[in-house]
Amino acid sequence: MEKYRQSNQNIPVELIRKTKEHWGVAIAAHKRFVGLIEEINATNSRLMHLKLNSNSNVHLIAAYAPTSDANVIDKERFYEKMDELIESVPAEEFLAIAGNFNAKLMYLDEEEEGQFGHFI
C-alpha cells in the first residue's frame, strides 16, 4: 500500500482489473483516508474488501450481486465468496457492507399498483 500513499492515488486500478467481465465494483476513498488504507482485496469483479487502520480496524465490503435471473451457480459462488470475506473479519472489528444486491422481490398485482415504487 505504500506506493498508493506516496503517489496519492485514491483507487489502485490494477487491483480491480483482474477479470474481463463487464461488471464492476469499487470503493472510492477521500484523499485524507488513503493513508489509512492497510489492505485492498478485489476478490473478483463483484466483491471488494478494503481495510482501514485507524484507532481500530474498519473493514468495508463493496458488493455487486448477480440478479435473481442469473444462473444458480453464479449466485452461489457470489454468496460463498461474500461469506468468506465476512468470516475473515474478526468479530471485534467494525464491518460495513454496501452494494447493489440486485434483488427482484416480486411482481405487483393490479390492485397493488401505486402502492410500491416501480423498481420493486
Image (tube, grey):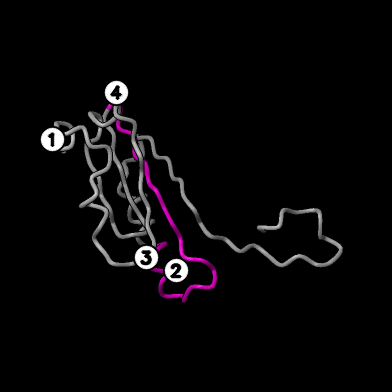
Tag count: 4
**Mark 4 or mark 1: whose residue is earlier in sequence:** 1
Against 107, residue 100 (above or below) is above
Earlier-in-chain disc, 3 versus 4: 3
Q: Is residue 76 magenta?
A: yes
Crowd band around label 4 with a 10 angstrom C-alpha radius: few (<14), some (14–19), many (20+): few
Task: Check contact, mark 3 vs mark 4: CB within 8 A.
Answer: no
Residue highlighted by disc 2: 75
Q: CA distance from mark 1 to mark 3?
A: 29 Å
Q: Amino acid at mark 4?
A: Asn
Q: Which mark is residue 120?
A: none
Q: Earlier in the sequence, mark 2 or mark 1?
A: 1
For this view, does 67 lie left or right of residue 105?
left
Crowd rating for badge 2 (residues with CA inside 10 Å; few <14, some 14–19, many 20+): some
Q: Which residue is mark 1?
A: 2
User: Which class describes the residues within 10 Å of circle 1: few (<14), some (14-19), or many (20+)?
Assistant: few
Label 1 element class: helix
CB within 8 Å, label 3 to label 2: no
Checking the image for residue 55, the label placed there is 4
Mark 2 secondary-structure assignment:
helix
State which tag comes first along the sequence, 1 or 3: 1
Q: Position of residue 44 (x, y in %)?
A: 30, 60
Location of residue 84 by image quarter: bottom left
Instruction: Please state the extent of the stretch shown in magenta in the rendering.
Output: 54-79
Would you name the residue on which mark 3 appears? 22
Looking at the image, residue 50 sits to the left or right of residue 111; the answer is: left
